[in-house]
Amino acid sequence: MIPAAFDYHAPTTLKEAVALLSQHKDSAKVLSGGQSLLPLLKLRLGQAGHLVDIGRIPGLEYIKEEGGMLKIGGRTRESTLERSELVRARYPILSDTAQVIADPLVRNMATVGGNLAHGDPGNDHPATMIALGAQVVAVGPKGERVIQIDDFFLGLFQTALQADEILTEIRVPTPPARSGGAYFKLERKVGDYATAAAAAQITLGPSGAVERVGLALTNVGPKPVRSATAEKHLAGKKPDAASIGEAARLVAQASSPSADRRGSVDYKREMARVMAVRALTRAVERAGGR
Amino acid sequence: MATHKIKVTVNGAPREAEVESRLLLVHLLREDFRLTGTHIGCDTTHCGACTVLLDGQPVKSCTVLAVQADGRQVATVEGLEKDGKLHPVQEGFWQEHGLQCGYCTPGMMMTSCALLARNANPSEPEIREAISGNLCRCTGYLNIVKAVQYAAAKQKEGVHVA
């Protein structure tokens, strides 16, 4: 399959890239790893007059801790995130997630920023970043702005990014001691989108009760599902089978999956609950809770 | 629509081409450079038949634009054999019967080469994980895993791999 014709631009600075996006507005698309965009163009489900490849801009691929945050460059490849010792040791929920995104070949091209900016509810990083309470940095003609992850996903393939903005960095607050996170995904086969998946990030207090919890679901609604009710239920409680089970039930109840080849609405909601139980349980284990 | 003059190093040799923006890397290799060892399978980023190494990393060349490879190194199955001698991975696929129809084989071998370059002694689960983006509909993967293990053992004997 061959995409419809477009013009390709390979700017070498962010400024130049933003200028191209401003010039071509809605007919331009940012090309990062291209692993979602190119299939869409090939299948002609999407169209672009101009592709602005940000792959030639230096300085957008990094993983570092700085100022109480993990900072991930928007162009960082999933395979780099997956193999990062720092991430594995201190942010295991991110390793969990990177390992189940598409397949190892796709992960050599696919980028963390692209996974978020695409706004696909089937993508895995959105739920993880919500659970972690992340922020994203967007650069546009007026400079840089920081967007809280809860304000980022607006709907199906819709994000808070403007047409002339580029996602340049993801910032994850470094969790305090006694924190842990996990991502569980049910997939029919390697490379598939989730039938349902859950991300959980937990911090335990001195008594062993839950001090902070972030819980979100993948691919069971037009955007990632977060439930304040579910999180409130766990907060302040001992994370045992009963409280975890109830929180998982509450977040699954807040989902709105649609039936497709991966299953019926009821099946997906039930699998979302099961994934949430597993993610919460593993998160508590990693937080040293049992 | 503008075309782009690109320079790509393919299997160590510098190549040039003038390409449309939308030309895919797999088509550049097969149609412009006549390197038809890289196959087109599903053409939808699933099967891995089109796997080549881009700067040493295995990628699906049906999902990379030719212009994205400008200034970079591409390795294809045609580059594995050196001076009439099979690459250990090729030898492994031959000795262990790691193929039946052969359609997935070039991609499977490129992925295997990249694995062995970063992990000289992969476990069976590591091999299976590494090739999980390459689909084979004939073998059931058992002999492919054995082929990679064969190549790893051969590499330990001092044969340079990838």
Image (cartoon, coloured by chain):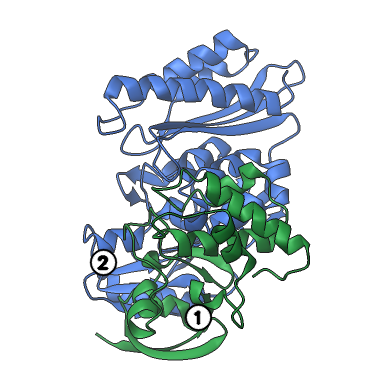
Chain colours: A blue, B green
Chain identity of mark 1:
A
Q: Mark 1: which secondary structure?
A: loop
- Asked if residue A187 is positioned above or below residue B68 in the image, the reply reads above
Image x and y of residue A21, in percent:
35, 72
Q: CA distance from mark 2 to mark 1?
A: 21 Å
| Residue at 31% over, 57% down | B42
Q: Nearer the viewer, residue B113 or A239?
A: B113
Image x and y of residue A19, in percent:
39, 77
Q: Amino acid at mark 1?
A: Thr
Which residue has dot 1 on it? A12
Q: Nearer the viewer, residue B106 or B102?
A: B102
Chain identity of mark 2:
A
| Residue at 50% over, 24% down | A276
| Residue at 49% over, 76% down | B78
Which residue has dot 2 on it? A26
Counting every numbered tag in the picture gives 2
Split into 4 quadrants, where in the image is the C terminus of chain B?
Answer: bottom right
Other residues around mark 2 within 10 Å, as few (<14) / some (14–19) / many (≥20): some
Image x and y of residue B26, in percent:
38, 72
Q: Is residue A75 visible?
A: no
On screen, residue A120 versus residue A128, left or right, reads left
Residue B3 quadrant = bottom left
Image x and y of residue A256, in percent:
30, 28
Q: Mark 2: which secondary structure?
A: helix
Other residues around mark 1 within 10 Å, as few (<14) / some (14–19) / many (≥20): some
Q: Amino acid at mark 2?
A: Asp
| Residue at 57% over, 24% down | A280
Q: Is residue A58 visible?
A: yes
Split into 4 quadrants, where in the image is the N terminus of chain B?
Answer: bottom left
